[in-house]
């Protein structure tokens, strides 16, 4: 199954995880950021708001997001606002 198919899942944990994994892989960045920003702003999502906020914060500060300990980080030239 392709990760972007999970962007439409009704479960917020599934959507958030799919978005974070895509960011860590350097794919579907714009869509992933949009999902995490939506989660971050919506009070109904509870603790998932903090998870989305911290995921975006770490990614923006480091320039990458590492999900697995053995993951090799490739350089990207993605710029965000």
Image (cartoon, grey):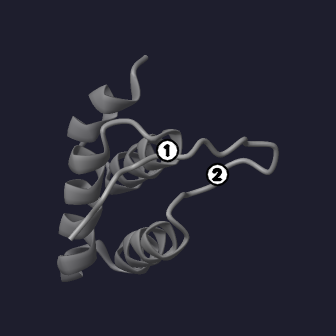
Marks 1,2: beta carbons within 8 A: yes
Where does label 2 land, which residue? 67
- Neighbour class for label 2 at 10 Å: few (<14), some, many (≥20)? few
In this rendering, position of residue 64 left or right of residue 67: left
User: Percent from the top left, x then y, of residue 64?
Assistant: 54, 58
The residue under the point 56% across, 57% down is 65
User: Which element carries disc 2, helix, strand or loop?
Assistant: loop
Q: Vertically, is 37 above or below 3?
A: below
User: Which element carries disc 1, helix, strand or loop?
Assistant: helix
- The quadrant of the picture occupied by the N terminus is top left
User: Percent from the top left, x then y, of residue 23?
Assistant: 43, 48
Give me the C-alpha separation between circle 1 and circle 2: 7 Å
Q: Residue furthest top?
A: 1
- Residue 80 numbered mark, or none: none
Q: Quadrant of residue 44?
A: bottom left
Q: Quadrant of residue 50?
A: bottom left
The residue under the point 48% across, 66% down is 59
Q: Vertically, is 35 above or below 42?
A: above
């Amino acid at each position: 199954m392709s990760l972007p198919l999970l962007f439409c899942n009704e479960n917020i944990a599934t959507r958030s995880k799919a978005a974070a994994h895509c960011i860590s892989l350097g794919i579907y960045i714009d869509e992933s950021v949009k999902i995490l920003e939506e989660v971050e702003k919506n009070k109904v999502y509870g603790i998932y708001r903090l998870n989305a906020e911290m995921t975006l914060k770490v990614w923006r500060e480091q320039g990458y997001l590492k999900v697995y300990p053995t993951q090799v980080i490739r350089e990207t030239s993605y710029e965000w606002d």
